[in-house]
Image (tube, rainbow, N blue to C red):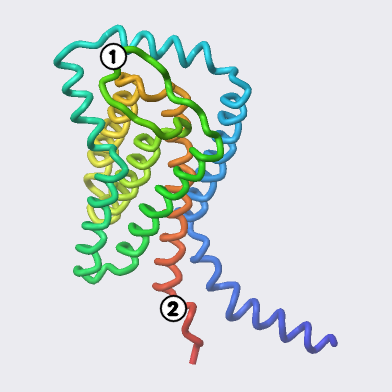
């Protein structure tokens, strides 16, 4: 028995343990931690929404934004919100995935497809689960019928634009700040337009961002692990 234990420990130290260390890279750990914290935040926010404890804040923010409407802002909002449409982003994302596959970047292409399809499916399930009604206002600029929480535009735009930003940073690190800044501005404007157009409450948009962060960083962490796994050839038995 003692000899068997010694042999197992020897195999762990010489073959398994050294390969697990690079797999659990700092990027993987940070991404997983962010995802876990975002999940906790979403659950807390969802509880507040279900208890209707955010109703006063939601209504106040909605009234302020609707009261600031103008012809120019209306058209700008309609244009920006179009960039966050889940349907538009799906087509855009899968087109890029095909391009990445053609460029022999199969792992990135596969994960982009997973990020997109998984994010849209998750948003659909969450909306059905919470079944929160959308704001009811006069003179709607757009008409939507599905549930409100979490915002699909906010969630899907953060997931897809965020993942594309990650891919760009992976290849052009010296432009990281530029990519992050532009992505943050675009995603923020998309969320703001959903409030301006009166189709979402403030907590819908925040919930979309937080839920999107959970899925985005879970996928990024998984991709980092997959890349490390491939580079270290864990699946190949040492000769």
Position of 116 relative to 62 (above/below):
below
Quarter of the view holding residue 219: bottom left
Which residue is drawn at the image coordinates 24% and 11% (left, top)? 69
Q: Name the residue under label 2.
A: 233
Q: Which of marks 2 and 1 is nearer the N terminus?
A: 1
Q: Quadrant location of the N terminus? A: bottom right
Q: Looking at this view, is 60 or 220 the one in front?
A: 60
Which of these two is toward me, 179 or 12? 179
State the residue position of label 1.
Answer: 139
| Spatial CA span between label 2 and label 1 | 60 Å
Categorize mark 1 by other alpha carbons within 10 Å: few (<14), some (14-19), many (20+). few
The image shows residue 54 at horizontal and vertical percentages of: 54, 18
Q: What is the secondary structure assignment of the residue under circle 1?
A: loop
Picture quadrant where residue 177 is located? top left
Residue at left offset 24%, top offset 52%:
91
Nearer to us: label 2 or label 1: 1
Q: Which residue lies furthest to the right in this view?
A: 1
């Amino acid at each position: 028995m003692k000899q068997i234990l010694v042999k197992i420990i020897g195999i762990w130290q010489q073959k398994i343990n050294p390969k697990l260390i690079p797999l659990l890279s700092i990027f993987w750990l940070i991404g997983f931690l962010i995802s876990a914290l975002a999940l906790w935040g979403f659950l807390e926010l969802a509880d507040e929404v279900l208890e209707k404890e955010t109703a006063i804040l939601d209504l106040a923010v909605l009234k302020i934004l609707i009261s600031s409407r103008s012809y120019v802002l209306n058209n700008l909002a309609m244009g920006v919100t179009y960039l966050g449409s889940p349907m538009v982003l799906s087509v855009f994302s899968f087109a890029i995935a095909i391009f990445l596959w053609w460029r022999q970047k199969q792992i990135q292409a596969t994960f982009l497809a997973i990020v997109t399809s998984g994010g849209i499916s998750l948003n659909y399930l969450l909306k059905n689960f919470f079944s929160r009604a959308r704001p009811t206002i006069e003179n709607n600029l757009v008409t939507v019928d599905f549930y409100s929480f979490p915002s699909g535009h906010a969630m899907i735009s953060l997931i897809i634009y965020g993942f594309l930003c990650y891919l760009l940073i992976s290849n052009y690190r010296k432009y990281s700040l530029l990519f992050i800044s532009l992505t943050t501005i675009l995603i923020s404007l998309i969320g703001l337009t959903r409030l301006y157009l009166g189709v979402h409450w403030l907590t819908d948009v925040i919930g979309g961002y937080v839920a999107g962060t959970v899925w985005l960083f879970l996928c990024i962490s998984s991709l980092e692990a997959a890349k490390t796994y491939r580079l270290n050839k864990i699946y190949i038995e040492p000769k």
